[in-house]
Amino acid sequence: MFSLSNAVAKQSMTVYEPLPKLRGGQPLMDYIREAQYKKLDPSGEKRKLIDRSNPERLRSGDIVSVFYKNQKPVNGTIIMVKRSGVASAILLRNKITGLGVEVNVPIFNPNVMRIDILRRPASYRPRNRHYYIRNSRLDVKEIKM
């Protein structure tokens, strides 16, 4: 007859040390967001531009110049600021030879070196998004550097 005790082989199991906690108890999405900010904006300058508590933040109506790594700078009036973390963007409007041109600029794009505020209005218009100025008497004039 077949003996059951002889059929079962004894195996030793290897036990490893537990891995160190990478996030230190921080929620996953907060950790990922901070890691992206460190990678895309190590100095924190771009974050300050969109921070609502900063009095020097970008606002609709400001005239700015955006400097790229391998392009000419782009000038324009901000007509929209989209604040959504790393996907934050501004919409610039300018008139070039009488034709209205709009440029959507992702703030945390690695090709954007810096954003300089050239001029602020004496008083800001109501609303945060100035889509209503398109093709009206309020439309922007040609902005040169």
Image (tube, helix red, strand yellow):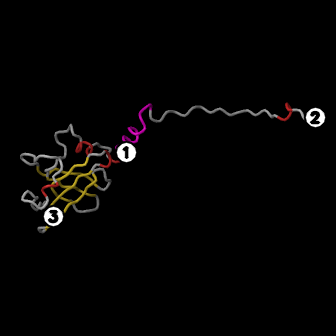
- Residue 139, position in %: x, y? 10, 59
Residue 33 is covered by the magenta coloring: yes
Query: Which part of the image, by quadrant, shows the N terminus?
Result: top right
**Gap in Å between the C-alphas at discs 1 and 3?**
34 Å
**Gap in Å between the C-alphas at discs 2 and 3?**
95 Å
The boundaries of the magenta stretch are: 24-39
On the rendered structure, is 13 left or right of 54? Answer: right
- Among the two numbered marks 1 and 2 on one chain, the one whose residue lies closer to the N terminus: 2
Q: Residues within 10 Å of mark 2 (few under 14, many from 20)?
A: few
Q: In the displayed orientation, state which residue is furthest to the right.
A: 1
Which of the labelled discs sits on residue 36, or is there none? 1
- Residue 23, position in %: x, y? 44, 35
Query: Which part of the image, by quadrant, shows the C terminus?
Result: bottom left
Residue 15 is covered by the magenta coloring: no
- Among the two numbered marks 1 and 3 on one chain, the one whose residue lies closer to the N terminus: 1
- Residue 96, position in %: x, y? 14, 66
Q: Which residue is mark 3?
A: 100
- Among the two numbered marks 2 and 3 on one chain, the one whose residue lies closer to the N terminus: 2
Magenta highlight: main SS: helix
Q: Which structural element holds mark 3?
A: strand
Q: Which residue is mark 2?
A: 1
Eyeballing the image, is 10 above or below 102? above
Q: Residues within 10 Å of mark 3 (few under 14, many from 20)?
A: some
**Gap in Å between the C-alphas at discs 1 and 2?**
67 Å
Q: Between label 1 and label 2, give the one nearer the viewer.
A: 2
Residue lying at 11% horizontally and 46% vertically, measured from the top left: 126
**Which three-letter amino acid code belongs to the residue tagged 1?**
Gln
**Which three-letter amino acid code belongs to the residue tagged 3?**
Gly
**Quadrant in the rendering for residue 6:** top right
Q: Nearer the viewer, residue 44 or 127?
A: 127
Q: In the displayed orientation, state which residue is furthest to the bottom.
A: 97
Residue lying at 10% horizontally and 62% vertically, measured from the top left: 142
